[in-house]
């Protein structure tokens, strides 16, 4: 019997050698979580587990936590409802009363506010050998336990600049996975995450780079491509953004100066 709320059993039929063969399989759970933040209610579709971290990371990524407006408590009233108590009222311009799908990291807000409150990351925040990045995608993949059973989850991992793996979070929504990871760091008192590397299992979208900047992460790596807006944010806010990190190669889109000992070949 499976007790993991992130995994649901399923009966399926596999087509092989010309026949449909019955099999037992596992699915990644996608279920709504209602986050009550003051008068606002946000429903996000997520994979159950680490819900308090998700709520904390969401509040942080939305810029709701400031020196004046601190996190007082997070209470999970039911398996699918969390209440976030802040020390001061929400800003007047903020509000979401909608469903945020597992694919959407910037839906449902009153304004598109990726850059609001972001601060540039110092160029001297860290440096690392390029070769240190090469094995990170494989290590993230190996650490994704639910993905190994279902094949249906995004993941992200946090490494320190020596390459030590600190935390991994998974979710059907890549923005949820990152909010869980940032929420973990927040509740552990580790923000800002200067001197850390973020590894993403999918493409690097602008909403993920924005969350990383807010958390102070200087190096963001992905197994896939970034979007044009993600590259623009990384260049303007001081993030070293790496894409297509596979095997023995990758593409650096911004601030390559943090990659020490790399030979820079300038085009003529």
Image (spheres, rainbow, N blue to C red):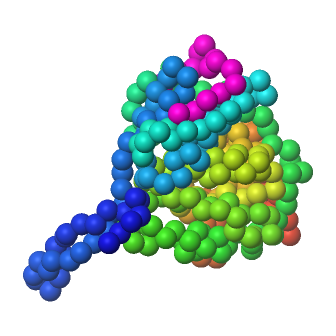
- Point 19% across, 69% down: residue: 11
Where does the N terminus fall, quadrant-wise?
bottom left
Residue 125 at x, y percent in the picture: 86, 51
Q: Please provide the residue range marked out in magenta.
A: 83-96
Answer whether residue 179 is visible to the viewer in this image: no
> Compared with residue 261, is residue 35 higher up or lower down, i.e. above or below?
above
Residue 53 inside the magenta-drawn segment: no
- Point 69% across, 20% down: residue: 88
Residue 134 at x, y percent in the picture: 67, 73
The reply, left or right, for residue 27 in relation to residue 134 is left
Residue 185 at x, y percent in the picture: 70, 51
Residue 149 at x, y percent in the picture: 39, 72
Where does the C terminus fall, quadrant-wise?
bottom right
Q: Nearer the viewer, residue 263 or 121?
A: 121
**Residue furthest to the left:** 19
- Point 81% across, 51% down: residue: 194
> Compared with residue 23, is residue 7 higher up or lower down, i.e. above or below?
above
**Residue furthest to the top:** 92
* Main secondary structure type of the part rendered in magenta: loop
Q: Nearer the viewer, residue 79 or 93?
A: 79
Which quadrant holds residue 215?
Answer: top right
Residue 91 inside the magenta-drawn segment: yes
- Point 27% across, 72% down: residue: 25
Q: Nearer the viewer, residue 262 or 84?
A: 84
């Amino acid at each position: 019997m499976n007790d993991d709320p992130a995994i649901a059993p399923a009966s399926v039929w596999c087509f092989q050698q010309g026949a449909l063969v019955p099999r037992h399989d596992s699915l990644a759970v996608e279920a709504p979580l209602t986050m009550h933040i003051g008068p606002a209610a946000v429903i996000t579709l997520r994979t159950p587990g680490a819900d308090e971290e998700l709520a904390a990371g969401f509040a942080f990524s939305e810029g709701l936590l400031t020196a004046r407006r601190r996190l007082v408590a997070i209470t999970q009233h039911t398996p699918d409802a969390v209440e976030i108590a802040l020390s001061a009222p929400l800003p007047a311009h903020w509000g979401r009363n909608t469903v945020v799908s597992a694919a959407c990291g910037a839906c449902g807000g009153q304004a598109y506010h990726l850059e609001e409150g972001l601060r540039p990351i110092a160029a001297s925040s860290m440096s690392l050998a390029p070769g240190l990045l090469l094995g990170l995608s494989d290590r993230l993949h190996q650490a994704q336990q639910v993905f190994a059973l279902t094949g249906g989850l995004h993941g992200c991992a946090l490494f320190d600049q020596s390459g030590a793996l600190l935390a991994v979070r998974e979710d059907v929504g890549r923005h949820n996975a990152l909010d869980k990871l940032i929420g973990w760091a927040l509740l552990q008192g580790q923000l800002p995450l200067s001197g850390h590397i973020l590894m993403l299992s999918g493409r690097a979208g602008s909403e993920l780079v924005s969350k990383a900047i807010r958390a102070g992460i200087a190096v963001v790596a992905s197994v896939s491509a970034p979007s044009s807006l993600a590259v623009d944010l990384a260049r303007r806010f001081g993030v070293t953004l790496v894409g297509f990190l596979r095997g023995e190669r990758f593409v650096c889109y911004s601030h390559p100066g943090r990659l020490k000992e790399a030979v820079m070949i300038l085009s003529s």
